[in-house]
Image (cartoon, grey):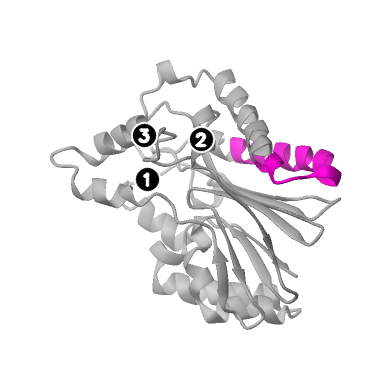
């Protein structure tokens, strides 16, 4: 998260805790040291209290870490005989780890108030490459995008739940707090095709998981991202950095980020994680 976005997010408070430099990490990414297995997760941002205090350490940051590490470890065990059917089983395995953590903190459905005491949750995207096949999943606004060697977009995982904006426009007299609580209670990990999914440990999250298998051509660039990178993936100069893959890749990224964040902290300054793979 950029300092500019942090200041925007906290501007209504006279003083906030923790300060920017101590704000807990809530994105997590993990790469196998054995196989081409990659995962990112984004802990769903929690609410500050009336005095501007944010939970620290962060429970959502912890479940993002636990989920990523559990999934990659289990995927490594199954790599040699990995099949498309194992994608959902792998997600279920990681989701159970999150359920155990939420349960250990007393965060069970009967006790939730959906604001100050809620499930710790995260979004996620995942890739495993084997025998020239890419096995992938995405959930909510963590995603996957693929560009060919001329930087044309050839694949992007499905967009996040679109009904939320419609509901926001029609929330009537409800306060934003009450509206957010209602959305979580009714639509989060709901069944029947409406709503949205996040990793909370609830079994219904599986209904919202996007999964697939695809081939990639030589020269393709595959990216796994959390939501803070979505807008970057539409910028030609950003994509070209990964096509060139020069020794200056880190400084090039920092330069683009600095320019874009100054332009719009809300669009480019969110906490963000990216794993890029050039085929």
Give, as a single range, the part of the protein colored magenta. 62-87
Q: Which residue in the structure is indicated by mark 3?
A: 184
Q: Spatial distance from mark 1 to mark 3, Cα to Cα?
A: 28 Å
Is 175 contained in the magenta span?
no
Residue at the left extreme of this rendering: 173
Q: Which residue in the structure is indicated by mark 1?
A: 15
Front: mark 2 or 3: 2
Q: Does residue 115 appear left or right of residue 136 in this picture?
A: left
Q: Which residue in the structure is indicated by mark 2?
A: 205
Is 74 contained in the magenta span?
yes
Q: Residues within 10 Å of mark 1 (few under 14, many from 20)?
A: few
Q: Assign a secondary structure to mark 2.
A: helix
Q: Assign a secondary structure to mark 3.
A: helix
* Placement of 115 over or under 106, stated as above or below: below
Q: Does residue 181 appear left or right of residue 30 in this picture?
A: left
State the image coordinates of residue 259 (x, y, percent, origin top left): 49, 77
Q: Residues within 10 Å of mark 2 (few under 14, many from 20)?
A: many
Compare marks 2 and 1 and give the one earlier in the sequence. Answer: 1
Compare marks 2 and 3 and give the one earlier in the sequence. Answer: 3
State the image coordinates of residue 29 (x, y, percent, origin top left): 66, 50
- In which quadrant will I find the C terminus? bottom right
Compare marks 1 and 3 and give the one earlier in the sequence. Answer: 1
Q: Does residue 52 appear left or right of residue 126 in this picture?
A: left
- Residue 56 seen: no
């Amino acid at each position: 998260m950029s300092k500019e976005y942090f200041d925007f997010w906290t501007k209504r408070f006279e003083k906030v805790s923790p300060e920017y430099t101590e704000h807990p990490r809530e994105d997590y990414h993990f790469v196998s040291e054995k196989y081409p297995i990659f995962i990112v997760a984004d802990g769903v941002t929690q609410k500050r209290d009336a005095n501007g205090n944010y939970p620290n350490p962060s429970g959502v940051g912890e479940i993002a870490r636990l989920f990523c590490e559990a999934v990659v470890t289990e995927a490594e065990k199954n790599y040699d005989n990995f099949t498309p059917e194992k994608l959902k089983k792998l997600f279920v395995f990681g989701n159970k780890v999150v359920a155990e953590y939420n349960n250990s903190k007393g965060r069970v459905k009967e006790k939730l108030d959906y604001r100050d005491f809620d499930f710790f949750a995260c979004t996620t995207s995942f890739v495993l490459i084997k025998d020239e096949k890419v096995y992938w999943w995405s959930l909510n606004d963590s995603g996957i995008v693929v560009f060919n060697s001329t930087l044309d977009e050839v694949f992007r995982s499905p967009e996040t739940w679109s009904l939320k904006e419609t509901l926001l426009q029609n929330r009537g007299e409800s306060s934003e707090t009450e509206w957010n609580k209602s959305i979580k209670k009714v639509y989060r990990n709901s069944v029947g095709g409406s709503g949205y999914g996040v990793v909370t440990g609830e079994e219904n999250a599986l209904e919202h998981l996007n999964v697939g298998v695809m081939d990639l051509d030589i020269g393709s660039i595959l990216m796994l991202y959390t939501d803070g990178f979505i807008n970057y993936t539409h910028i030609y100069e950003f994509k070209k950095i990964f096509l060139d893959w020069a020794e200056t890749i880190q400084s090039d990224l920092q330069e683009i980020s600095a320019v874009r964040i100054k332009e719009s902290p809300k669009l480019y300054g969110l906490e963000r994680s990216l794993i890029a793979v050039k085929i």
